[in-house]
Image (cartoon, rainbow, N blue to C red):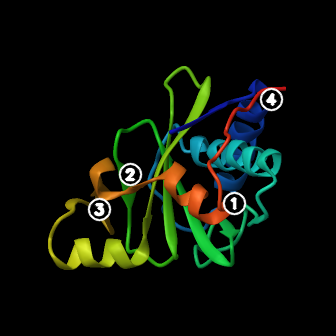
């Protein structure tokens, strides 16, 4: 796991930006009072990637539609899934990788936990190995930690050396 401290200014920005973005929606999205944690996770993860010197592109949060990933690392689209939960929630997989992170209830840190490829998700779905949670107009799959690769192993392969992930000044 990679534990990254969250800054209060980023919490405030994520809440305000999410509120602003939600006001312009022209569709019915799932009503969620903590929807801002997705953006908060992206901001925090982007800062960590930058500090680690990991080349990446962060795709603008206010993009129209969901045809683009949150990040591109090593030429591959990555969607960051952030929740307070201990499992990752994913809809139909379409990006190369999905990274699972959770935010502590006190909003003090982002814990980046695991990664799973679209290919693996497709196999798990086909074999009925994921729990399905259905809501009106939406189907989510629950992906558990045992079904993911550790985030450290992903970055160690990417970087070619052990990961140093201290986020201190």
Q: Check disc 1 and report its element: helix, strand or loop.
A: loop
In the rendered structure, the answer to whether residue 15 lies left or right of residue 83 reads right
Sequence-first tag of 4 and 3:
4
Residue under label 4, please give it. 9
Above or below 72: residue 131: above
> CA gap, disc 3 to disc 1?
28 Å
Above or below 58: residue 6: above
> CA gap, disc 4 to disc 3?
32 Å
Residue under label 2, please give it. 88
Q: Nearer the viewer, mark 1 or mark 2?
A: 2
Residue reaching furthest front?
161
> CA gap, disc 1 to disc 2?
27 Å
> CA gap, disc 1 to disc 4?
23 Å
Mark 1 burial class by Cα count in 10 Å: few <14, some 14-19, many 20+: few
In the rendered structure, the answer to whether residue 158 lies left or right of residue 92 reads right
Q: Check disc 4 and report its element: helix, strand or loop.
A: helix
Mark 4 burial class by Cα count in 10 Å: few <14, some 14-19, many 20+: few
Q: Nearer the viewer, mark 2 or mark 4?
A: 2
Residue under label 1, please give it. 24
Please say if the residues under marks 1 and 2 sit with CB atoms less than 8 Å apart.
Answer: no
In the rendered structure, the answer to whether residue 79 lies left or right of residue 13 reads left
Residue under label 3, please give it. 141
């Amino acid at each position: 796991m990679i534990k990254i401290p969250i800054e209060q200014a980023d919490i405030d920005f994520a809440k305000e930006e999410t509120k602003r973005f939600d006001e312009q929606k022209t569709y019915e999205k799932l009503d969620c009072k903590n929807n801002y944690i997705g953006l908060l996770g992206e901001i925090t993860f982007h800062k960590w990637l930058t500090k680690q010197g990991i080349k990446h592109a962060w795709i603008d949060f206010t993009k129209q539609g969901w045809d683009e990933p949150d990040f591109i690392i090593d030429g591959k689209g990555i969607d960051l899934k952030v929740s307070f939960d201990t499992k990752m929630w994913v809809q139909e997989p379409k990006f190369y990788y999905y990274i699972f992170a959770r935010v502590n209830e006190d909003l003090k840190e982002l814990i980046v936990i695991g990664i799973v490829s679209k290919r693996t998700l497709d196999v798990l779905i086909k074999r009925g190995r994921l729990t399905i949670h259905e809501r009106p107009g939406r189907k989510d799959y629950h992906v558990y930690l045992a079904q993911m690769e550790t985030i450290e192993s992903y970055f160690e392969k990417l970087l070619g050396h052990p990961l140093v992930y201290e986020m201190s000044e």
